[in-house]
Every structure is written in C-alpha cells, then in structure tokens.
Amino acid sequence: MREAVSRALRANLGLIDAEQENRQARAARIKALSVLLPQLSLDATQDYRNFVENSIGLDGTIPAFNFQTAHVNLSQRLLDISGMHSAAAANESLEASRAGLSDSRNIVVLAATSSYLLVAASQVRLETAKAQLATARATEILIEDRIEHEVSPEIDGIRAKVIRRSAEQRVAVANATFEKDKLALTRIIGLPIAQAFQLTDALIYSPSPDQSLDELIDVVKNRRQDIRAASARLLAATQTVKAQSAQRLPVLEVNANAGETGFNYASSIPDYEVGARISIPLFTGRRIESDVLDARAVLSRRQAELSDIQARAIYDVRSAMLDLKAAQTSVDVSVENVKLATEGLRQAKDRFQNGVTTGVDLIRAQQDVAEAEDNRIASIYAHSLAKLMLIRATGTAEANYSTYLGVQ
C-alpha cells in the first residue's frame, strides 16, 4: 500500500495539476513583488542623423553625423500603496495554493488507499468464492453418491447441482470484479494498464485509535488544509480590496540614468539624468470604483466560503465518527455470524452423513456460510473505508493512513 500511495503521489493527474497551479501562484507573487523592486536596464544606441537649423529658427543644415550612447537606467517606485497591497494579496494567494496542494495530496492518498482496499476486498471475495465452489462440488459428489445408493432423494441432487452452478457463477463475477478493480487502481497510481501486479497487504481488520470527538475537532482546526486555503484566500481578498482602493493614492517614482555619449565610444563624454515623478489620479471614469466593488464582491464570497468549509469540516468529522461506530458494530456482528454459520454447517454435515436430515439443510447451511463470509468481507472493507474518511475529514490522510489501516 505504501508503494501504491507513493506512485499515486508521483503520477496522479489531479496532483500534477495542483502542482502547476502552485507554480503559477508563485509566479504571480514574483510578478507582484517586481513592481516594488528596482528596475535596472542597459541600453546602447548607434545614431546617424542630420540637423536642420530651421527647426530652431536658423537657416541651414548641419551635415549628417554619427553619435553613440551607452546608459544604465534605474527606475524605482518609492511610494506605491496599491502595489504593496497587491504584493500582500499575491503572497496570501500563494499560501492558499500551497494549502490546496497539501489538500490535493490528502485526496490522492484517500483515492489510492481506498482503491487498494477495494482490490484487496475483491481478492478476498474471489478466494472465498473459489473455496465455496470447492465445497459445493464436494457436497454435490457426496449427495450423488447417496442418491446412487438410494439413501437421498433425486431432488437433493438437483439442489446440489444448482448450488454448484451458482458458485461457479459467483467465481466468474468475482474474478471479473477483481480484474476491473485492479484496472482502476493502475489508473490511480500511474501504472501501465497491462502491467501485472500483486497486492502484498491484505484486507485486515484493525481497530481504530481511540480519540474523542473534541480531540478530532481540534485536529481539524489545525490540520485541515482546505480551511487553511480558504483562510488564505480570504486574506488575499482583503488585501485586494485595499489594493484597489489605494489606486486613488499618489504614486511616487524615481528615474535615473548614467552613461556616456559621443561621436564614438573612445571619445564619449559622461552624462547622467535624475528625475522624480508623482502621479495622482483625478478622474478615471469610475474605473477604480468598479474595481473596488468587484474586489468587495469577491471578499464577501470568500467569507461565505470559509464559513461553509469550517461548518462542513465539523460535519465531516461527526458523520465519519458515526459511520465508524456503525462499521465497528457491523464487523463484530459479521465475525460472530461467520462463527455461528460455520458451526451450523458442521452440524448439518454430521446430521446429513448420519441420515438424520436431507440435503436441504446442508445446502442451506452452506448458503448461510457464504452469505456470512461475504458480509464479513464487506463489513471489514466498510470499517477500513470509514477510518479513511475520518482521517480525510481531519486532514491527516497522508500522515495517518498507515496507522489507521494497520499497514506495516
């Protein structure tokens, strides 16, 4: 199971998409910060021109001449409140993306482990169906022998043949289900479809760690990554509202360049220029107002989203706890039923062999064992799945799946 989870975390398409979104959020943060950082550039020119003196009120033309320049340019925004809030919003968006990536990893772990358990359950069902088929064949042979010696009626033989053919059908269906579940697992963990493999971790029952509801709710508040992502998105929306509102404030920028100019680089003359610019928006056609309204709408949506996710997280934990308790009871009952059905089959065989009863009781006892065994497998799978859903609800699927499932 550990290898299956490891492969899923490397190859699952959903996680790859989440990783790329995280890279895009990181790029957006860098871009937002770049507005506040100094901008340096180097340029050089080679110019060939003439100068018409009429352009300055004199007659004549200065013949064509060459000149060259080489300058380093610096631009720096000293005051940009809107840019500062935009950078803060981008930083929170990156934090939300990181939390979303962690949540995606938990979802992939849940998908891989649940699919692995489904394959393990299908494998046990197939093995059980084969064992039941072997028992049905042995019973059919026994009854045919008794019919041949005129100890049992012909109807017992017909019933035994029906049970045997039904067992063959169950084996065929169980085998097809097992192979289909394996195909689904290969898709999740990124194996080639035609790749043959075997499970080394069987479907087993292991009791869940003893934790109270209050302890689990505390874990939710600290470890649930979708809550963390929603909180970061809310902070990003708050900073975006401030950034849009700050567009009305002045922007102060300093520009400078230094270099050399001359007819050629060997005889160039150093020159420089320093200037400052302040920009104050006076009328923007209500563009800023529309940006603020749009940002506030997003903020309201993020607030509602956070409240909903927090409530849903508590609901998920409570629901998972109820499912886990029900699954635990189902496991206890199914295990006891298997013991009782097995004992009933043993007694039915003894009674049949001693001629106390007909083959009907023996066949019914075999059906009871098959049904009890199927319920046991289903209850153990449901119990394991309920534990997975509980650690998914607490946001600790990747960290705790091996502990909760008893993986060595």
Image (cartoon, helix red, strand yellow):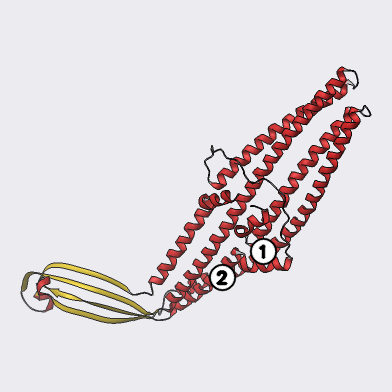
Query: Which label's residue is closer to the chain start, 2 or 1?
Result: 2
Label 2 neighbour load within 10 Å: few <14, some 14-19, many 20+: many
Residue 264 in picture, x, y percent from top left = 10, 70
Q: Which residue is mark 1?
A: 313
Front in this rendered view, residue 383 or 64: 383
Q: Is residue 370 found left or right of 287 in the rendered image? A: right
Front in this rendered view, residue 367 or 137: 137
Q: Residue at x 64, y 46 (%)?
A: 201
Q: Which residue is mark 2?
A: 234
Residue 24 in picture, x, y percent from top left = 45, 61
Above or below, 48 against 56 in this view is: above
- Give me the C-alpha separation between circle 2 and circle 1: 17 Å
Number of marks drawn: 2
Residue 35 in picture, x, y percent from top left = 38, 72
Label 1 neighbour load within 10 Å: few <14, some 14-19, many 20+: many
Above or below, 305 against 152 in this view is: below
Front in this rendered view, residue 341 or 394: 341
Q: Is residue 141 found left or right of 243 in the rendered image? A: right
Spot the residue most to the right.
356
Question: Which image quadrant is residue 377 in?
Answer: top right
Q: Residue at x 69, y 52 (%)?
A: 385
Amino acid type at image mark 1: Ala
Is disc 2 placed on a helix, strand or loop? helix
Amino acid type at image mark 2: Leu
Above or below, 267 against 350 in this view is: below
Residue 371: which disc?
none
Whether residue 88 is visible to the viewer of this picture, yes or no, is yes
